[in-house]
Image: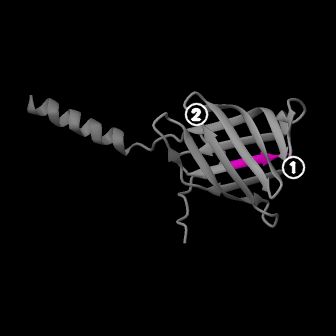
Amino acid sequence: MGRVRRIAAALSLAFLALPAAARVQRCRPSVKYECAEQRCVRVSEGFQHAESFAWNDKAGLLSACLWSRCYQGSVRPLRDRSGAVTLSGSLASEPAGLPPLYLSLTIAADGKFTAVWEQRGDGLVFDIGRCNGSSAPSPWPAEKPQEKK
């Protein structure tokens, strides 16, 4: 019996030592709202191919591609009891040199998301849609989040 326990313990430790696959949530909007001080305009066609968001939970990286510009940055997730995760932060442009993008992305446990971006003094833009999670290799480099100073 002792031998079986030792083997089980060794297998458990070996399993824990395996690298965990990153869960990557890839999010595509179905509707967008462009809001100004007095009203929001609903946009439901013609933008879905050009806007996307992704969250790599292992690397701690949030990314967004909005038309011809892409952004990426390290963020810390905030999770609630419902299983939702909220990610907010300033994302650097890629290629570097363009202004950063401040993004707040909330992904519910059922895969629905809301992304708020382009915050201005007189309005903002938000997208609503669905995320597809996978344990496939991420297109983003596997880096640890940078400590904020």
Q: Are marks 2 and 1 in contact (CB under 8 Å)?
A: no
On screen, residue 99 versus residue 105, left or right, reads: right
Point out residue 131 in the picture as x, y percentages from the top left corner. Answer: 65, 32
Point out residue 116 in the picture as x, y percentages from the top left corner. Answer: 72, 46
Q: In which quarter of the image is residue 75?
A: bottom right
On screen, residue 64 versus residue 25, left or right, reads: right
Mark 2, Cα crowd under 10 Å, few <14 / some 14-19 / many 20+, is some
Mark 1, Cα crowd under 10 Å, few <14 / some 14-19 / many 20+, is few
Point out residue 129 in the picture as x, y percentages from the top left corner. Answer: 72, 31
| Quarter containing the N terminus | top left
Give the label on residue 68, or none.
1
Q: Which residue is drawn at 46% across and 42% down?
A: 20
Q: Quadrant of residue 99?
A: bottom right
* Residue type for callout 1: Ser
Give the label on residue 108, or none.
2
Whether residue 21 is in magenta: the answer is no
At mark 2, the secondary structure is: loop
Q: What stretch is highlighted in magenta?
A: 63-68
At mark 1, the secondary structure is: loop
Depth check, mark 2 against mark 1: the one in front is 2
The CA span between labels 2 and 1 is: 27 Å
Q: Residue at x 67, y 42 (%)?
A: 54
